[in-house]
Image (cartoon, helix red, strand yellow):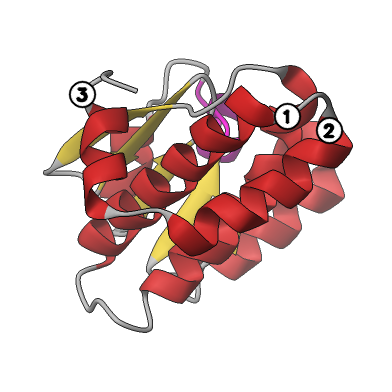
């Protein structure tokens, strides 16, 4: 699992991430800006990145996009509140890494991880009053999220 956070902000960061990509991580979480910087092409997509690096690309934002270069899926963000969305970046990466311990298919692991994280984020956002309460409620929601909750969240029924 590699998180490319702010890879395009400086040459040093870009080169560091590129050096880590040579180790062929199973999953790479990026923003669309990071992907464009790493691919040196403003029009590069998460699917291009996945195919080029032979990895699973997880491009997060208001809509989370997952691709292994062949399969792809969009997963809606559980929250669009800026202070909560920033907190979730690390949670997405950590959950992807955790899922890789129980699922060999990196694409399935990434999709599963995001479904869980985004469902927990939606539950937490509904009850929170700000970033502090969101963090605690998010951890609680992660503990209790069910397959039924995920299905409702992914189909927009929550």
Residue at image coords 29%, 35%: 47
Other residues around mark 3 within 10 Å, as few (<14) / some (14–19) / many (≥20): few
Secondary structure, mark 2, is: helix
**Quadrant in the picture for residue 110:** bottom left
Q: Is residue 83 left or right of residue 48?
A: right
Question: In the rendered image of this protein, does residue 52 appear above or below residue 93?
Answer: above
Q: Distance between the residues labelled 3 and 2?
A: 26 Å
Q: Choose mark 3 or mark 1, whichever is in front.
A: 1
Q: Is residue 36 left or right of residue 10?
A: left
Front one among 134 and 97: 134
Residue 75 placement (x, y as % from top left): 33, 31
* Labelled pair 2, 1 in contact (Cβ < 8 Å): yes
Q: Give the range drawn in magenta.
A: 31-41
Residue at image coords 42%, 39%: 119
Q: Mark 3 points at which residue?
A: 155
Is the C terminus in the top left, top right, bottom left or bottom right quadrant?
A: top left
Specify the label residue 131 is tagged with: 2
């Amino acid at each position: 699992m590699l998180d490319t956070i702010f890879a395009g902000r400086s040459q040093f960061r870009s080169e560091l991430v590129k050096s880590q990509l040579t180790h062929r991580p199973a999953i790479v979480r990026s923003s669309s800006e990071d992907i464009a910087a790493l691919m040196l092409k403003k029009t590069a997509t998460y699917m291009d990145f996945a195919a080029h690096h032979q990895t699973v690309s997880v491009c997060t934002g208001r809509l989370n996009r997952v691709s292994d270069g062949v399969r792809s899926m969009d997963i809606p963000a559980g929250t669009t509140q800026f202070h909560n969305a920033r907190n979730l970046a690390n949670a997405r990466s950590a959950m992807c890494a955790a899922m890789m311990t129980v699922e060999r298919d990196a694409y399935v692991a990434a999709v599963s991880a995001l479904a869980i994280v985004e469902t927990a984020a939606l539950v937490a956002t509904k009850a929170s009053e700000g970033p502090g309460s969101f963090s605690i409620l998010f951890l609680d929601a992660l503990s209790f999220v069910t397959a039924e909750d995920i299905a409702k969240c992914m189909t927009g029924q929550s």
